[in-house]
Amino acid sequence: MDFLFDAQGEDVVSGRRTPERGEGLSARFPELARELSAALVSLEAAFSDVQDVEFTIERGRLWFLQTRSAKRSPRAALRISVDQVSEGLITTAEALRRLQEIDRARLSITRFEQKPEPIASGISAAPGMASGRVALDSEMAVKMSRNTDPVVLLRPDTSTADVAGFAVACGILTATGGRTAPAALVARQLGKPCIVGCDALVFDMVGRPGWVRPRSGKAIGFR
C-alpha cells in the first residue's frame, strides 16, 4: 500500500514524491488501518479479483474514491491466481482462463548467484536484474541504445515524457516515486526490472555532462 499524509491522489501516483508504506498508516491511525484492511478483503471477495483502490482519510473518516481490478505483471498474475484458488475465491478453471493470455517467457527471473553488497536501495517495483550503461534522460537512452549497448535509465522522477526511455532501457531506477508511479506501472507492463524511491541518489541535471551518485559516495554515472 502506498499513501501520503497531507496530500492528494495525484501526489501518490505522479512519481514526484516517494509515498509511505502501510506501517506508517497503522502507527498513526490504527483503527482506520484495520477498517481499511477489512474493506480491502471484502472488495476482493466481491469482485473475485485483486483491487486497485483509491482512498482518502478526512477528518478522521475513511472514504473510498474508486476501485478497479489491479494491473499486474505475468509473475504476479500467476501468484495471485494460485493464491485465490487456494483461498477458494476462484475456481481452477477461472484461474486457467485468466492466465491464458500471459506471456510465459516473462515468468522467469534473473538473479545474482551471490548477493552483492548494495550501494543504495529503494522500492522494488518490478523484479529482475539489469546491467548496462547509465543514461540520465530518455533522449540519451535512445541514442545510446542505437549502438546496441544495454542502457539503464536513471531519473530523479518520471513522467509520460519518459516513455521513449522506458522502451529502450533494460532497467529503470528513480530517486522518488512508489509502486504506482509511472515508471513502476510501465516497467511491469514491459517486463523490465525497476526500482523506485531510491532516495540515496543525488542528481545534478543542470550541468553538462550530468551526474548521479549515492549521497555518501562518488559519482556513478555520466552522460
Image (cartoon, rainbow, N blue to C red):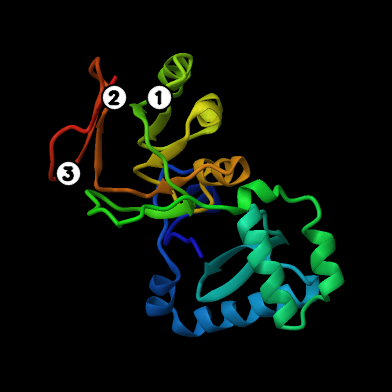
Disc 2 marks which residue? 205
The numbered dot on residue 58 is none
The amino acid on which the numbered mark 1 sits, given as a three-letter code, is: Asp
Q: CA distance from mark 2 to mark 3?
A: 15 Å
Question: Splitting the image into 4 quarters, where does residue 151 fall?
Answer: top left
The amino acid on which the numbered mark 3 sits, given as a three-letter code, is: Arg
Instruction: Work out whether 153 lies above or below 24.
Output: above
Query: Which of 140/56 is in front?
Result: 140
Residue 175: x and y in percent read 34, 43
Helix, strand or loop for disc 3: loop
Residue 65 visible, this angle: no
Q: Earlier along the polypeptide chain: callout 1 or callout 3?
A: 1
Q: Nearer the viewer, mark 2 or mark 3?
A: 3
Residue 12: x and y in percent read 49, 52
Q: Earlier along the polypeptide chain: callout 2 or callout 3?
A: 2
Number of numbered discs on residues? 3
At 74% from the left and 68% from the top, the residue drawn is 49
The numbered dot on residue 137 is 1
Q: Quadrant of the C terminus?
A: top left
At 64% from the left and 67% from the top, the residue drawn is 79
The amino acid on which the numbered mark 2 sits, given as a three-letter code, is: Met
Query: Which of 85/124 is in front?
Result: 85
Instruction: Work out whether 134 lies above or below 13.
Output: above
Q: CA distance from mark 1 to mark 2?
A: 9 Å
The numbered dot on residue 215 is 3
Q: CA distance from mark 1 to mark 3?
A: 20 Å
Q: Are marks 1 and 3 in contact (CB under 8 Å)?
A: no
Q: Are marks 2 and 3 in contact (CB under 8 Å)?
A: no
At 67% from the left and 54% from the top, the residue drawn is 71
How many residues crowd mark 2 within 10 Å: few (<14), some (14–19), many (20+)? Answer: some
